[in-house]
Image: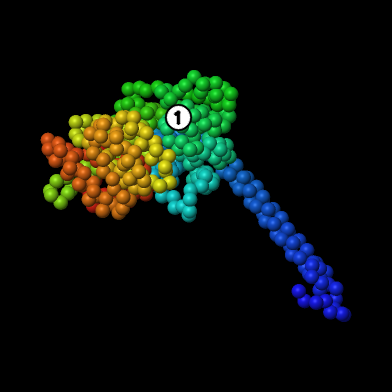
């Protein structure tokens, strides 16, 4: 410490700052406060302008339909929009499934390019685009998973008169719950008062009626029919009867006939995550077929899709191999698949290939299941598609050696997750294999 010299200002004493320094600090603090206050005012002004703009755009769109649920939202959105367009109505739609797509009123599709992660504020831009296009109808797949975000998306951003729930299958368990009832309850609790809600008859439970009265929305259950079953068969790609049934019910609500729906669906573009099939030729003049069901994601939906595809192809007796793609950020889905398989829900796979982060741990978990079912278990690390294809071909050849009678009748299903390896493998097959219409 420096000594205090006679004649030196006492302001220099340690612990005592000069008055001018204190005034400078106060001045700087007041400037920071003013900047913060000014920024807050600008932000509030921005919110006010955006709210007014959103309300103005909303008033120009006669009907807004939101599509929610667990699986099939993109398909439902396209079916509803296609039927409305065929009836001569001007409709703008948006899907956010495997890739986000804006469907313009003339049927043109534009891939939505995102900067960074997806956000529900994207719906505000959708409303503005529909208003600018002078659309009569807006049909949008809801983006949120968490109930709180879904509630805000419905109440503030889309404000739909109609919400369609595709189903309440078990997925996104960390946000929605571990069983169907929890998932259904949490999704239905996001519905704003005054909304008309469509659900499948088989998804209905008595408590839903009480909830609809309590929250003041109208609940419509949709039963299966020969009409919806026949319509699902005319589509140029595999589609579940339940999706066609829900879409037809919504279309009829707005005066669109089954015949108009049929005409609108016959040439409908499918979602990029639809079931797709390729014939893969191996180096020994052999071949096998690969079917992408990656976008089905959860086990129940995947099993239903496998049954739909094998029935459509007449492949019930053919040999089948599963390729289960795991993701590091979807541990809940990995655990769901492990529990599903260990219960013995799938007993028709000759082999199961597990690939991706956690594949070895998954293999240890399924070892007893594989021994009990006689299913051969293959573990592949997360790798490039061309390298993984060597492992898939080896599994196919092994299946043929054990079961020589099947010859070329070998079908490999891509399961689990479309994100990550699933997308990379699809891109690789598009470049190297022959696409087959299902």
Relative depth, front residue between 239 and 334: 334
Q: Which residue is mark 1?
A: 179
User: Which image quarter: residue 215?
Assistant: top right
Residue at horizontal 67%, vertical 56%? Answer: 39
Residue 355 lies, in percent from the top left, at: 31, 46
Q: Is residue 132 visible?
A: no
Residue 259 lies, in percent from the top left, at: 35, 29
- The N terminus sits in image quarter: bottom right
- The C terminus sits in image quarter: top left
Relative depth, front residue between 150 and 57: 150
Q: Image check: 135 left or right of 39?
A: left
Residue at horizontal 52%, vertical 31%? Answer: 186
Q: Image check: 360 left or right of 1?
A: left
Q: Is residue 227 visible?
A: yes
Residue 141 lies, in percent from the top left, at: 46, 39
Q: Image check: 40 left or right of 413?
A: right
As helix, strand or loop, the secondary structure at mark 1 comes to loop
| Relative height, residue 87 to residue 18 (above, below) | above
Residue at horizontal 40%, vertical 47%? Answer: 328
Residue 374 lies, in percent from the top left, at: 23, 34
Residue at horizontal 32%, vertical 41%? Answer: 364
């Amino acid at each position: 410490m420096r000594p205090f010299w006679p004649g030196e200002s006492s302001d220099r004493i340690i612990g005592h700052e000069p008055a001018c320094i204190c005034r400078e600090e106060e001045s700087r603090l007041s400037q920071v406060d003013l900047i913060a206050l000014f920024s807050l005012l600008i932000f509030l002004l921005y919110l006010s302008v955006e709210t007014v703009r959103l309300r103005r755009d909303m008033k120009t769109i006669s009907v807004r339909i939101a599509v929610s649920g667990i699986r099939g939202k993109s398909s439902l959105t396209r079916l509803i929009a296609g039927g409305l367009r065929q009836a001569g109505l001007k409709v703008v739609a948006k899907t956010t499934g495997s890739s986000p797509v804006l469907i313009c009123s003339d049927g043109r599709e534009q891939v939505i390019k995102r900067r960074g992660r997806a956000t529900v504020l994207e719906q505000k831009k959708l409303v503005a685009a529909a208003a600018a296009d002078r659309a009569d109808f807006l049909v949008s797949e809801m983006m949120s998973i968490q109930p709180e975000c879904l509630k805000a998306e419905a109440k503030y951003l889309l404000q739909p008169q109609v919400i369609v729930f595709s189903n309440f299958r078990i997925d996104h368990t960390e946000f929605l719950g571990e069983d169907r009832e929890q998932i259904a309850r949490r999704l239905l609790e996001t519905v704003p008062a005054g909304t008309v809600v469509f659900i499948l008859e088989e998804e209905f439970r008595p408590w839903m009626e009480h909830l609809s009265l309590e929250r003041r929305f109208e609940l419509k259950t949709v039963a299966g029919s020969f009409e919806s079953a026949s319509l699902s068969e005319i589509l140029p790609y595999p589609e579940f009867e339940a999706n066609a049934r829900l879409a037809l019910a919504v279309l009829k609500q707005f005066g669109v006939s089954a015949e108009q729906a049929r005409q609108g669906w016959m040439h409908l573009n499918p979602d990029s995550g639809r079931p797709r099939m390729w014939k893969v030729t191996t180096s020994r003049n052999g071949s096998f077929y690969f079917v992408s069901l990656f976008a089905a994601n959860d086990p129940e939906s995947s099993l239903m899709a496998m049954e739909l595809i094998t029935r459509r192809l007449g492949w019930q007796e053919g040999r089948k191999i599963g390729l289960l793609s795991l993701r590091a950020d979807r541990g809940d889905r990995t655990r769901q698949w492990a529990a599903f398989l260990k219960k013995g829900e799938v007993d028709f796979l000759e082999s199961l290939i597990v690939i991706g982060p956690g594949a070895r741990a998954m293999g240890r978990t399924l070892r007893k299941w594989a021994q009990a079912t006689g299913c051969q278990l293959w573990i592949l690390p997360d790798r490039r598609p061309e390298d993984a294809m060597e492992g898939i071909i080896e599994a196919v050849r092994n299946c043929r050696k054990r079961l020589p009678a099947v010859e070329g009748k070998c079908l490999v299903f891509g399961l689990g997750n479309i994100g990550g390896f699933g997308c990379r493998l699809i891109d690789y097959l598009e470049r190297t294999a022959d696409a087959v219409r299902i």
